Image: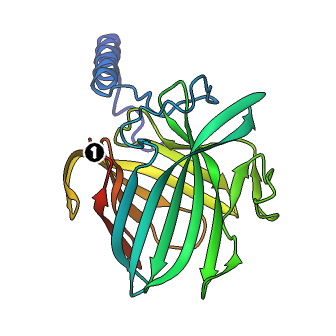
Amino acid sequence: MRGAGRFRLTKCTVLLMMVIGAIVVLTSTSATPARASVPPGPPVFSNPLDITNTYQPFKAGALKVFKGRKEGKASVIVDIYLDDTRTFDFGGGDVECHIVQETEFEGGQLGEVSTNYFAQGDDGAVYYFGEVVDEYENGVIIAHEGSWLVGGPTLPSDPVDTANASEPGLFMPANPQVGDAFKPENLFPVVDETVTVIATGKRVVVPAGKFLNSIKVRETSQLPGPAEIKYYSPGVGVVRGTTKHESFALVATSLRP
């Protein structure tokens, strides 16, 4: 063996190295706080309609309006926080969910309407129970691509090709921290999305105002398409988003921190 006999460790040297190693381990452990923001186990829902999560709030009757561009065309997105709820069977019990209806216009024409379902777990995280997507062309529904629900289609109004998810996705942890990664949508190849928190404490300025203590996330997918950057602000939720072919910013809302 090349170099054999050139480096020998005495007992004192070994002991000293063990002490130094222990100090390094203890120091690195204390300097890196454990993150409990992404729950490790299945969620429990005692009061699912009581959404207190600051980065994904809910207020019945609230509105959010975004403007931007998509594929070179002007776009407008309107989020309506509905009074209605929907109940899903999960974990051997019923989980009642709030509903957010998102309507998107592209170039002045109705492009898509999606109905989204959210509930808060006992861990303070908001969970995503799915969405029903109606894609429009010339005012007529032409497809339901990307539709999925926990338990699959159960109502007459649900598209028959709605994908069946066994559990909800984690949409927003109670206390998101840099490095956290979670999956709001996890039903490849129908839908797939991984969200990674890349910054906290951000200041974001959009037409609707200035928002402090925002988080910045990156959304990626196994499905084709570029990554997306989004900003979520306390008491408001998402306020800005950008991808290679799309951008949007909040211009008006009745939600305020």
Identify the residue at image location x=29%, y=23%: 24
Identify the residue at image location x=43%, y=86%: 107
Q: Is 69 placed above or below 79 here?
A: below
Q: For the residue marked with disc 1, what is the amino acid?
A: Arg
Q: Quadrant of the C terminus?
A: top left
Q: Which residue is mark 1?
A: 256
- Image-quadrant location for residue 68: bottom left
Q: Which type of secondary structure does the marked residue at label 1 adopt?
A: loop
Identify the residue at image location x=21%, y=65%: 207
Q: Position of residue 231 (x, y in %)?
A: 32, 55
Q: Is 53 placed above or below 159 here?
A: above
- Image-quadrant location for residue 136: bottom right
Res 168 seen here: yes
Q: Is residue 194 left or right of residue 168?
A: left
Q: Position of residue 4 (x, y in %)?
A: 42, 36
Q: Is residue 81 left or right of residue 240?
A: right
